[in-house]
Amino acid sequence: MKTNLKMILISSFPPRECGIATFSQDLSNAIRKIYGHTLPLEIYALENDLEKCVKRDKVTDTLHAPTLAEYRRVANAINERDDVGMICIQHEFGLFGGDFGENILSFMLAVNKPIVLVFHTVLPNPESKLKSVVTALCDLSEKVIVLTENSQKILKNEYNIITEKIEVIPHGTHSVLWKDKEKLKTKYGFTENIILSTFGLISANKNIETVLYALPEIIGKYPNVIYLILGKTHPEVIKNDGEKYRQRLTEIITSLNLTANVQFVNKYLELDEVLEYLKLSDLYLFSSKDPNQAVSGTLAYAMSTGCPVISTPFPHAKELINDSNGILLNDFNNPKQFQDAIICLLDNNEKRTEMGRNAFSKMRATCWENVAIGYGRIFGKITNKNEDLIYQLPVINTLHFEELTTNFGMLQFSKFDTPDLTSGYTLDDNARALIAIIMYYEKFNKEDSLTLATRYINFMDFVQQDNGWFQNYVDINGKITSKNHEVNLEDANGRALWSLGYVLSKKLLIPNNIIATAENCFVKALPNIASLTSPRAISFALKGLYYFNTTSKKSVEAVTEIMVQKLLRYYEVTSDQDWNWYEDYLTYANSVLPEAMMNAYLILGNKKYKEIAEVTFDFLLSQYFMKGKIQVIPNKGWFHKRNERTFFGEQPIEVAYTMFTLELFYQVTQKIKYKEQLQIAFSWFLGNNHLTQIMYNPVNGGSYDGLEKENININQGAESTVCFLLARLVIDKWETKNESETFNIMSYES
């Protein structure tokens, strides 16, 4: 088996208790999750006289930072290896010995592998010695990663580091769900309380006393306030000063009569505990007195959980906080400013909630999965081994899919990850959900899937009228809405036929009660097919006929011929030498049209239909696939013939539909290009898109609703979530265990 080049990560590492150690553990976990065995990772853990690394199962080697000879020893050992592609050094000045941590330079000078240096702190206004050390660190590095835009500016403007050498990859955060604040308050015994919090390894630099002095006035107005000080004292502080700072805080608490309103959680918190405390907090307070603190992981974590923040004006806070997601104070060491800001937000629940939502949304881009992708791309560029990096398929997760489903059917929308009951139901979503859950059942054979399938098919039966036509829109109370009379429902009826036909093609797999309902609905709708005129409605119906034809004794050749002739006329009227398509524009569900033409070929055997299917699909793919990525037609502007192609505003449904078509074309033609493009298409969800961000929620398996120009719409509606599950189940069929044919995306990138 081929062995890929490895990344060596030099950093402090748990069980050592410091922010860099936690960062490196989270980063290494994320890299392994995203790239698996294709980006092997080794940890070289930094030790000092106070803290030793004992988790040898996760650590390849250790480096005793105060000992200069250790740097040479480790460098020489690495130089003897030919399996190391890159060394990544997580840098903080206090981690390495010598002036400004200059001992690490001896390692960098001695080692003969490419180095990427990650600056967690970049100090402005450097004195001569500091500047010379930082400049040398950068000169010896292939790339320098910083965590904020401000740090990049300082390196460029004050250390004269060239722009091309610097990459900005933000501090990672953990994906969490928006909901559960009240449940967590109950769990921790704070049901009746307003919770303020701060967390991290405690030191005087956190300046917690500033908040304590602000509390008396706040408690006078809100006596149920609890201020949580989360975390144990920093080990270096313990080493030098013991618990003097915590004792000082305790004295202040007593003198201000705050004992009932301030609680210490004096321990090193596990990740789940940290996230739960932050989620249950009503406000997060960051009181640091260091104006040069480059980055704060605690601030990033708090915002990522949807907690509005009140912070002193240090650089990272200035970059993250605005009027929509928190309050940035004007000064340090100012209890009155904290007091006023806290009372302002406690007085306005609506504003506080909106700030939390905006913070939650802003920080999605910084999830650890996206950070890992950033590191992987740098590794690929430095080693010239992009082709070896392979996105790992995420676990199939139906949590959000199931949460969207009530006893009546699948709800239409979500606000973030919370199903929106006011959005009601649609035939479209329930028809697609039925296909997805049958595919899921076929793979996993879980009986619960059939319960969901029964709800979806019953919903479809409910919205079908006596004349066979389906209604599309139903409100939360189960009433057909007036919207059904305001919009054209042809496409929805076509989708219903596709769904029903698919179910009937699985009649040997699915219980009779589901099949009987599907068959009744399909037969009832069949006489209406010939009256469809919309190209997409025709195409969805042809898909349904194709699936129905695979197991039915009832001939559908006559109606198939009628329908495909309609589609053929669209093609003959519109297409020309430069525009091999059925309409004068590309809009939504485009791939369904050539797929339907191929379905007609499979039913009727007419090779003309196969030829047109391939010509038109290849034309569509020429508009979709560029530089190793898929970029489908956005919902913000259709692509009209002879006009400029539009970009940005891509939706999961278009990618999933294209994957269905690619799968069929590969099965029929056995042309490898379709399989390769199928894999590229799915990689859009995994981060192979113009934002290089994942399009799914790794916690609940939902999919985000849209890929915009500069951000992702992180609502997780039914359409997107169902289509991600469909896409994931499709690609699962084509994942091969042969490494030479493994799901490879990076090799397509330019």
Image: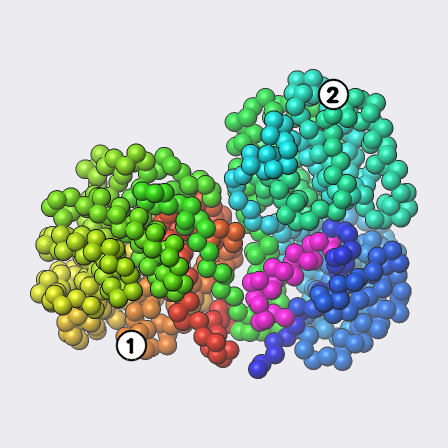
Q: Are marks 1 and 2 in contact (CB under 8 Å)?
A: no
**Residue drawn at point x = 76 percent, y = 24 percent:** 258
Q: How many marks?
A: 2
Three-letter amino acid code at the position of disc 1: Thr
Q: Is residue 181 left or right of residue 102?
A: left
Q: Is residue 707 above or below residue 396?
A: above
The image shows residue 391 at horizontal and vertical percentages of 52, 66
Residue 180's quadrant in the figure?
Answer: top right
Residues shaded magenta? 20-40
Q: Residues within 10 Å of mark 1 (few under 14, many from 20)?
A: few
Task: Examine the residues drawn in magenta and state their main secondary structure.
Answer: helix
Name the residue nearer the viewer: 666 or 499: 499
Name the residue nearer the viewer: 32 or 320: 32
User: Which mark is first along the chain, 2 or 1?
Assistant: 2
Q: Secondary structure at mark 1?
A: helix
Q: Is residue 318 above or below residue 747?
A: above
Q: Secondary structure at mark 2?
A: helix
Q: Which mark is residue 669?
A: 1
Which circle, 1 or 2, is nearer the viewer?
Answer: 2
The image shows residue 566 at horizontal and vertical percentages of 13, 60
Q: Residues within 10 Å of mark 2 (few under 14, many from 20)?
A: some
Q: Which mark is residue 453?
A: none
Res. 353 in view: yes
The image shows residue 353 at horizontal and vertical percentages of 54, 31
Name the residue nearer the viewer: 731 or 447: 447
Distance Cα–Cα, label 1 vs label 2: 75 Å
| Residue at image mark 2 | 216
